[in-house]
């Protein structure tokens, strides 16, 4: 009887010990899991903050480019008001075009008060200037803002996004006209964002307020609606999360970071967790866009 009791006590002690061991191990694994999740969340947050710095730098640079173009327009206006010859006028326009070429200025043109073109400097062979409604638009554009962005369809290359800047100026002989700049928005934004690298494979892209891609490393996306372009490319993948971020935050002019699941990243298929940071471009020249 005593031996039986001893065996029972030993077995009970072993079972109790094993049970307590499992509890301790389970709790330890839970702490490891919690700690690893916290570490992962912290790593993601740190990475997104780094991405946000890149986004802010890009937005600041785009704003600086636009302000440089505006300053060039105002300087040109002051220059011709001093009274210059027709030849000097052409040279001044050529200099303006050259200085702003890398900032996306495609065409610099001067028209009379009726919108008839007097002289033009073209920074690229494929650029064309539509002068429809120029007098009406320019007469109501005292603040020098970019007109509604349009898709410039190209037959030989990818489509681009363009906009128009203009200013009413007073010409010699007490006449007036319009200084008109056609802006290649895709080139302007690409020059700023194409070299952005976040981690090994991260990249930058730019939307306007309507959700249209102004720049994307995949040129086929430029000019396309961001909410539909991805789905058209990969219809079997859900983009609900990134679409929600764009709709509720990005297109509302907010700054922030986020995380979402996707099934595609630069040709890689499968469930992929993506990190995103975004900030608005707040230039006064983009009030209507």
Image: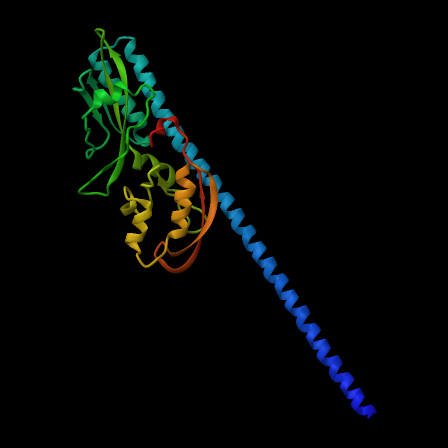
Left or right of 185 on screen, residue 115: left
Provide residue 173's location: percent of width, then percent of height: 21, 6
Identify the residue shown where x is 48% and y is 44%.
Answer: 257
Q: Quadrant of residue 247?
A: top left
Identify the residue shown where x is 31% and y is 53%.
Answer: 231
Residue 120 vs residue 70, the one in the foreground: 70
Provide residue 209's location: percent of width, then percent of height: 35, 37
Query: Is residue 130 positioned above or below 84 on the image?
Result: below
Identify the residue shown where x is 22% and y is 32%.
Answer: 124
Quadrant in the picture for the C terminus: top left
Query: Residue reaching furthest top?
Result: 173
Left or right of 14 on screen, residue 56: left
Left or right of 203 on screen, residue 166: left
Left or right of 216 on screen, residue 90: left
Residue 249 vs residue 142, the one in the foreground: 249
Provide residue 108's location: percent of width, then percent of height: 24, 24
């Amino acid at each position: 009887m005593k031996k039986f009791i001893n065996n029972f006590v030993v077995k009970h002690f072993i079972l109790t010990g094993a049970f307590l061991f499992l509890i301790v191990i389970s709790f330890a694994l839970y702490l490891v899991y919690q700690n690893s999740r916290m570490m992962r969340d912290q790593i993601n947050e740190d990475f997104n903050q780094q991405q946000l710095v890149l986004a802010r730098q890009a937005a600041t640079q785009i704003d600086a480019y636009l302000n440089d173009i505006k300053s060039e327009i105002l300087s040109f206006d002051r220059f011709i008001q001093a009274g210059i010859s027709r030849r000097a006028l052409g040279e001044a326009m050529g200099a303006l075009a050259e200085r702003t070429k890398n900032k996306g200025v495609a065409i610099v043109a001067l028209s009379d008060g009726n919108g008839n073109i007097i002289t033009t400097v073209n920074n690229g062979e494929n650029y064309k200037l539509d002068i429809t409604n120029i007098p009406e638009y320019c007469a109501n554009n005292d603040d020098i803002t970019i007109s509604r962005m349009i898709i410039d369809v190209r037959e030989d290359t990818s489509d681009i996004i363009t906009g128009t800047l203009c200013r009413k100026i007073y010409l010699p002989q007490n006449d007036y006209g319009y200084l008109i700049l056609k802006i290649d928005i895709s080139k302007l934004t690409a020059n700023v964002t194409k070299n952005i690298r976040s981690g090994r494979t991260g990249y930058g892209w730019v939307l306007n307020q309507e959700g249209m891609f102004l720049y994307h490393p995949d040129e086929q996306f430029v000019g396309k609606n961001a909410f539909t372009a991805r789905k058209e490319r990969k219809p079997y993948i859900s983009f609900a999360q990134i679409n929600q971020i764009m709709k509720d935050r990005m297109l509302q002019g907010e700054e922030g970071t986020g995380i979402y699941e996707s099934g595609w990243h630069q040709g890689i298929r499968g469930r992929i967790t993506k990190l995103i940071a975004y900030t608005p471009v707040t230039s006064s020249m983009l009030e209507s866009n």
